[in-house]
Amino acid sequence: MPIVAPMDVDGFVVRAGFLGDAAYVATGEGTIHFVAVGETHLAPHKNGLLAAELSTDGTSLITSGDDGAIYASSPDGSSELLAERPRKWIDLIACGPNGAVAFASGRTAWVRLSDGREKEFAHDRAVGGIAFAPKGLRLAVSRYDGATLWWAGTEGKPVNLTWKGAHLGTSFSPDGKYLVTAMQENALHGWRLSDSQDMRMTGYPAKVKSFSWSVKGKYLATSGANAAIVWPFFGKTGPMGQTPLQLGTRSDVLVTVVACHPKEEVVALGYQDGMVMMSRFEDNAEVLLRRPGGHPITSLGWDNAGLRLAFGSEKNEAGIISLQDG
């Protein structure tokens, strides 16, 4: 049976996961908890913490807040100020290759390169989401009526991808062939980047707020229904013409968060009622990881070995679930 070790946290959990062997939980109250052999507690932001992302080299947690600051924090207790936009509400960040960090507020996105140089990207409408391509310094910015692809390291011309409506969270496929956005409506939209072919993924009863690519990038798992909706992305047309998998189905409780396993075609699911489950793509086999009875799960994050899963909820709940062999 899985073992659940609770952590003492306050408030809404923005992000939970692992930095190497250390588990971390970042809360909206502005506190970052690191748990390894001992515990370290940091509060780099003056006010609340709004977003958190793991650096691509896995050595620090990048956070932003309503103080307009972006920090890199580590389990050794250090926090470094990377950038600052006083009086800005920085609620979108993304981590890219070679230490690049993107962040956004209002209609503007910025990229801070590893040498401290910054580039600014202005848009006509508010930025809804940002993401780096898996290779190269290419930044996707989702917005109203589509997304824009920028070259952050050069002066190359941007590429505009269009589709009517408000586009929010955004993600590149691990192979860089597709860009997917979560819509303000209950749907996903995608583009095949080789020819800008549109892909429409609909049928959700609620907004999609969480998505996670499988270990080899063959599947995209999403929240927004009473099961994890898992779209196949193999083949020349991606999910078009293919039926998605539905994993971890429950009769009347929505999935709020999904997190694909780092080594196997398995997904962890967090639900509205605090339950956490694990489900296998091949046969929908399920393992209960945490019983229901709490607040909606807001974040899930695996360690590199896929043997521990950190979780957090909307209110004062977090912990580490350890899987046992056999």
Image: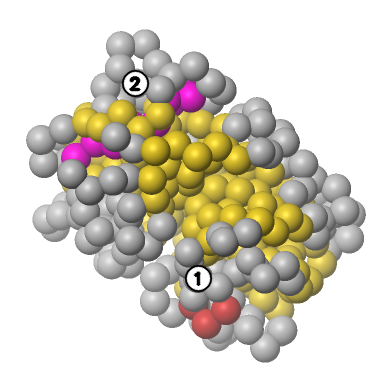
Residue at the spot 50% in from the left edge and 70% down from the top edge = 58
Which residue is label 1 attached to?
A: 58
Determine if the magenta segment contains residue 296: no
Q: Which dot, 2 or 1, sits closer to the camera?
A: 1
Which residue is label 2 attached to?
A: 226
**Which residue type carries mark 2?**
Asn
Classify mark 2: helix, strand or loop: loop
Q: Is residue 130 left or right of residue 4?
A: right
Q: Which mark is residue 276?
A: none
Against 165, residue 59 (above or below) is below
What segment is highlighted magenta in the picture?
Answer: 271-280
Q: Position of residue 81 (x, y in %)?
A: 78, 71
Crowding around mark 1 (Cα neighbors within 10 Å: few <14, some 14 to 19, many 20+) is few
Residue 212 appears anywhere in the view: no
Front residue of this view, candidates 78 and 203: 78
Q: Position of residue 18 (x, y in %)?
A: 50, 58
Crowding around mark 2 (Cα neighbors within 10 Å: few <14, some 14 to 19, many 20+) is many
Q: Is residue 183 left or right of residue 268?
A: right
Against 325, residue 78 (above or below) is below
Classify mark 1: helix, strand or loop: loop
Residue 113 appears anywhere in the view: yes
Residue at the spot 39% in from the left edge and 70% down from the top edge = 134
Q: Position of residue 326 (x, y in %)?
A: 18, 44
Which numbered disc flags the more N-terminal residue, 2 or 1? 1
> In what quadrant of the picture does the N terminus appear?
top left
Magenta highlight: main SS? strand
Quarter residue 234 falls in: bottom left
